[in-house]
Image (cartoon, rainbow, N blue to C red):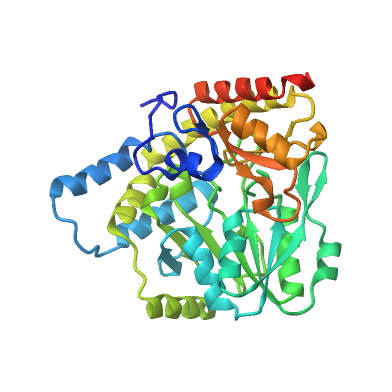
Amino acid sequence: MSFDDIIDRRGSHCVKWDMMEAIYGVPQDKGLAMWVADMDFRPPQCVLDAVTAQVDHGIIGYFGDDSKYKAAIQWWMAERHGWQVEADHIFTTHGLVNGTAMCVETFTQPGDGVVLFTPVYHAFAKVINAAHRRVVECEMVQADGRYEMDFDAYDAQMDGSERMVILCSPHNPGGRVWSRGELAAVAAFAKRHNLILVSDEIHHDLVMPGHTHIPMTHIEGIEDRLIMMTATTKTFNIAGSHSGNVIIADPDLRAQFGQRMAALGLSPNSFGLFMATAAYSPEGAAWVDDLVQYLDGNRRLFDDAVNAIPGLQSMALESTYLSWVDFAGTGMQRAEFTRRVEQDACIAVNHGPTFGTGGDSWLRFNIATPRARVQEAVERLAAAFKDLQ
């Protein structure tokens, strides 16, 4: 199995490849899908073997005894992140968008404010709005080509109706790996304004060489308000399993969340549990190490080529496989640079405004695809903007 293998996902009910024409007008026959945040790589063989074993057994029944599953999570968090997790602190949700929605439903009321540091993953605002809560956008600032947070400005924005803050750590779409000082500042902000702090750490395994992710749980003094969210889905490219973990150390918060889960009758699907158990293993760890090296090579290729096009600037990627490109330097209106990317280059990408305030001049590119496709993408972009060179 090689990350260079070209796997044709068209016609497989793959939203990323099969829906790009309907959503973005990018022809399916010649388009490159670089939007939805899943990878064009097969997961490690141990994960595929776990699925095959269930199919070969032939009976797909209810899952019982999740002790091995929880032990695998405990092993992974201790081994890879220095985080000791208690088994009874783990809830399994239907992915982390569902986990986010469950947190909003459990810990806030209609009309409450939920703070986001924007631009940020678009699903957060979507579930907040759908739950009739109010999105409070705290726009990040750019310093030396990367995002930082301005808590003096954010303190001034708060009106007392806010009940929760959601942090994306590492950050999507900017790729920031937050420092310990920045995480402590987020924690202090949550304490000052008496906010539940939800830390979505789904990208925590996909960190570029030279950077180290720090779990929010390592910041002292916030256990009574902290909700941690992790998943195998992004790390191992098994998003279709729709499984994620909400991990809550505080007993009162844990009781509230457990009650809400029970009231909704939620339970995970067995394939997700089998896949996660297999993934969180030494074999899975070796695969992730190889993956990160490959993504780093894609990052360097993409950034060098994009930044060579006058007017385009890719934000330095410290984590994730989602490159955030600013087109402000072209002097073009958003409709024009988007048209060139989608119609001239035939690349489907995420539009910056969907990530909230601060995203207007940006597009997000998914570079978790065989390197030959990344090379083709940058050649198409260079041709689409050749008049600027």
Residue 20 vertical position relative to residue 105 in the rendered view, above or below: above
> In the shown orientation, is residue 30 left or right of residue 70?
right
Residue occupying image coordinates x 73% and y 63%: 137
At which x and y percent is residue 94? 41, 62
Does residue 248 appear in this view? no
Residue occupying image coordinates x 37% and y 71%: 266
Residue 202 vertical position relative to residue 226 in the rendered view, above or below: above
At which x and y percent is residue 313? 75, 32
* Numbered disc total: 0
Residue 369 vertical position relative to residue 263 in the rendered view, above or below: above
> In the shown orientation, is residue 313 left or right of residue 264?
right
At which x and y percent is residue 252? 53, 81
Quadrant where the image shows the N terminus: top left
Q: Nearer the viewer, residue 375 or 146?
A: 375
At which x and y percent is residue 200? 57, 58
Quadrant where the image shows the C terminus: top right
